[in-house]
Every structure is written in C-alpha cells, then in structure tokens.
C-alpha cells in the first residue's frame, strides 16, 4: 500500500534505537493500532438494541450512525494514504488516537442521535488514519518476501481484534448500560492507541542525492499506473464493483447480527458468542485464504470463497433461527468475507503497480463506504418494511456477482500504462 522505500536508507536501529527501530516492534505496534479500532466496527452490533431504547429510535435511524462511520472510515482512506505517505506517522496517528477515543467514548455522553452521528463520524476519520498508517507500516518495514505476511497479520488484527473486547463490552452493557460501555472502552482504546502512536515510525531515508523527480516509476520501459490512469481502465471499475458487492454482505452481518438474532429469538448469550466468533473467523479468513491463494491463484480463490459466502448468506433467513446454525452461518460468512482485505491489495499491486499503491488502493477501499450504507441503514430499513429474507438474498446475489467478476478479471489481459508498448511493459496476461 505504500510507496517503495528508497534503497539508500539509514539503519533504523541507529536512527531510532534498537527497540523502536526493530521491524517486529513496528509490526506489533501496527497490530495494536488495528485492534484499538476494531471495536468501532465489529462491536457496534451489540450496542444497536440498547441505543434504540435509549433514544427511542428506529433500527434504521440508529444504523445510520454505523453507515456514517463506515463512510468516513473508508472514503477517508485516499486522503489518509496521501498524508501518511508524506508526513510523520507519529503526529498523524496521535491525532487519530484522540479522534477515536473522543468519538467512541463520547457516544456514551451523546444526548441526541445527531450528536451520536457526529461523534461516530469523528471516530471514523481517526480509524481511517490508523488503518492506513498500520497497513503502510506492515508494507514498508518488511522485504517483499515477507510483505504479504506482515500486511496479512495487520489486516487480521482489525478483523479479529474486537474478540478481545466483546465479552467485556457485553458485561458492561448488561450491568451498567451502553453509556458506560462506550465511555469505558473509548478511554481504553484511545489511551492505548495514543501510546502506540508515540513509537510508530517508518524506515528512515537518507537525504537523496540523485533521486529521480517525483512521478511515475520508470524502469526499463515499465512504469506503474497513476491514479488518473487507473480510473481510465475497465479493470479498476470491475475491481471496484467486486469489492463493493462482496463487502456489502459482510457489512450486513457486522451491523445486523444482534438485531437479526433478537428478532429470530436467539438467546442473548448466544448472540455474544456469535459476535465473538465472527471476529475470529473474519481475521482467520484473511490469513488462511491468503495462504490458499498462493497455491490456487488469487482469482480462483476469490471465486471459491465468494461462492461459499453466497450460499451461507442465502441460508441465514431459512435456517438461521436455530442457535447453532445462527452461529455457524454468520461465522462462515465472515470467514469467506474477511479475505477481501488481504487479496484486493495484492490484486491492486499486481495490476497497477506499487508506486501509487497507497492512493490507488484507497480508492478501491472507498467502496466500503457504499457497502456500509447498504449493509447498515438500507438493510435495516428493508428489514423493517419487508423482513430479513430480501436483505440476505440480495447479499447472496451480490456475492455471486463478485465471484463471477473474479473469473472475468482472470480472463482479461493486464492493462498497459499509456505510452508503454505491450512488448516492453513487463505486464503479462491475467495471473
């Protein structure tokens, strides 16, 4: 996701000291940062019924807050990537830590839905910077042979990090209410993220002497796509739609696990178990499917995973009223959904190159904002009006389309940047 660091770099241990200058220290710090923002997305479903009661509001009105969070967290990625690549991660992540602490914790003090929307949106902006900075750290500190492993672990921390907090949150919700749960976890997350931010660094670069001018990477007849050039390819729009379609199903599960479970008559303790298992399955999928893709190929892996995802989505309204199937199906959906955050960055780099990977992937990732609106507010509105069957069947159809899109992408020849001949570009037909 980040611009390739210059080979003319200083020894990070000399620049930062043996502890902070250790790449494994930086990887752990990136993982901690991701865990501290995981609750903002994956623990939200536990709060929905309580917030509805607290504000005497409809499900759709409350879920609009979730949609706004996802919009700011995802649509802020291109902007976050731009600043993360150019300025001190410590400064930016310090501000971001304050945003998530104040935003999430402040929702426990909000007296109106409007205030809750503003605070949740503030937390979303902070999450965008922490997500972008953490992924960039995983990419920059590790050589190419371990870069996938590093970024996969960081992404998995976001997918599974909430599992550490969900049982704790459930206890506070039951004994003290949602206000205390927001404030307590907001303070904890904000402080830990703030401490981690003080030690976050990127590998230092020596002052360039004969560095090339800023612009597209050019080597032996090959260069990478700028963002504007990427927009002009059919590949980008196909990838964007695939990301949008598969992401929507996961957003439905993330936002609606608790509301669906309560309406289906699932016991409260089983819903907590499901929410916890969902986050574990989400993180595990990012690692396991990534490993499978090394042998099966990324596009084939996407097709298999997205098809399984579609089947599970379609079965939820049919047999998801059973406690065991409720937990199993939702976990299966998340297991076959989370890998999109490991595979799509790789596909982006494969097709469009690494020079502008942070910004380019940020625009692909921004599709998550639309998915959050559909999976949160729209899904809740449809469920209120017509029930859950149309919600999950629509998600299943979108997952099928994402899988078919992967097969189409596999068959397309890779695009060539303007001004580069096919024979000299180094790009080959779809991997």
Image (spheres, rainbow, N blue to C red):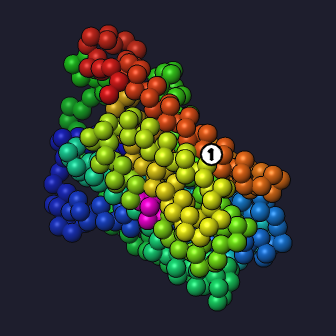
* Residue at the outermost bottom position: 175
**Could you tell me which secondary element the residue under label 1 belongs to?**
helix
Number of numbered discs present?
Answer: 1
Q: Is residue 397 above or below residue 252?
A: above
Residue sitting at x 21%, y 19%? 220
Location of the C terminus by quadrant is top left
Percent across and percent down for residue 8 are 17, 42
Q: Is residue 259 left or right of residue 386?
A: left
Q: Nearer the viewer, residue 394 or 73?
A: 394
Q: Quadrant of residue 159?
A: bottom left
Image check: 359 left or right of 29? right
Screen quadrant of the N terminus? top left
Q: Position of residue 101 (x, y in %)?
A: 55, 71
Q: Report if residue 102 lies within the magenta region.
A: no
| Residue 38 visible within the image | no
Query: What residue does disc 1 label?
Result: 395
Q: Is residue 32 above or below residue 87?
A: below
Q: Nearer the viewer, residue 196 or 331?
A: 331
Residue occupying image coordinates x 52% and y 81%: 168
Estimate the x, y position of residue 46 in percent, counting from the top left.
63, 71
Q: Is residue 429 left or right of residue 265?
A: left
* Front in this rendered view, residue 159 or 212: 159
Q: Where does the image place residue 257, in percent across and percent down from the top left? A: 62, 64
Prevailing secondary structure class for the magenta stretch in the rendered image:
helix
Residue span colored magenta: 279-283
The residue lying toward the viewer, choosing from 303 and 21, is: 303
Q: Residue 236: tell me if it is visible.
A: yes
Residue shown at 44%/29% (left/top)? Answer: 407
Q: Residues within 10 Å of mark 1 (few under 14, many from 20)?
A: many
């Amino acid at each position: 996701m980040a611009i390739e660091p210059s080979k003319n770099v200083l020894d990070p241990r000399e620049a930062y000291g043996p502890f902070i200058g250790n790449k494994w220290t930086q990887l752990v710090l990136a993982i901690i940062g991701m865990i501290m923002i995981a609750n903002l997305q994956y623990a939200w479903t536990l709060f929905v019924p309580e917030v509805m009661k607290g504000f005497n509001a409809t499900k759709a009105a409350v879920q609009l807050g979730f949609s706004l969070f996802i919009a700011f967290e995802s649509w802020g990625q291109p902007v976050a990537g731009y600043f993360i690549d150019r300025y001190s991660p410590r400064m930016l992540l310090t501000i971001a830590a304050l945003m998530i602490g104040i935003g999430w914790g402040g929702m426990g003090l909000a007296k109106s839905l409007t205030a809750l929307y503003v605070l949740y949106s503030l937390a979303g902006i902070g999450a965008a910077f922490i997500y972008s900075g953490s992924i960039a750290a995983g990419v920059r500190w590790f050589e190419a042979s371990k870069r996938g492993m590093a970024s996969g672990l960081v992404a998995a921390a976001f997918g599974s990090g909430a599992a550490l907090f969900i049982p704790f949150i459930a206890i506070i919700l039951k004994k003290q209410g949602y206000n205390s749960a927001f404030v307590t976890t907001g303070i904890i997350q904000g402080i830990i993220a703030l401490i981690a931010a003080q030690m976050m660094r990127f590998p230092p670069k020596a002052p360039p002497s004969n560095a090339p001018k800023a612009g597209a990477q050019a080597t032996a007849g090959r260069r990478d796509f700028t963002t504007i050039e990427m927009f002009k390819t059919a590949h980008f729009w196909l990838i964007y739609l695939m990301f949008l379609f598969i992401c929507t199903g996961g957003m439905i599960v993330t936002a609606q696990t608790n509301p669906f479970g309560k309406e289906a008559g699932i016991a409260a303790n089983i819903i907590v178990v499901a929410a916890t298992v969902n986050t574990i399955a989400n993180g595990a999928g990012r690692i396991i499917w990534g490993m499978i893709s090394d042998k099966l190929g990324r596009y084939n892996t996407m097709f298999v995973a997205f098809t399984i995802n579609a089947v599970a989505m379609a079965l939820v309204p049919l047999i998801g009223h059973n406690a065991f199937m409720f937990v199993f199906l939702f976990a299966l959906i998340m297991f076959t959904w989370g890998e999109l955050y490991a595979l799509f960055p790789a596909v982006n780099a494969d097709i469009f190159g690494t020079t502008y990977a942070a910004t380019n992937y940020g625009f692909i990732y921004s599709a998550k904002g639309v998915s959050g609106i559909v999976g949160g507010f729209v899904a809740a509105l449809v469920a209120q009006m017509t029930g859950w069957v149309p919600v999950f069947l629509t998600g299943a159809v979108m997952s099928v389309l994402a899988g078919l899109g992967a097969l189409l992408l596999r068959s397309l020849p890779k695009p060539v940047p303007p001004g580069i001949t096919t024979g000299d570009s180094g790009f080959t037909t779809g991997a």
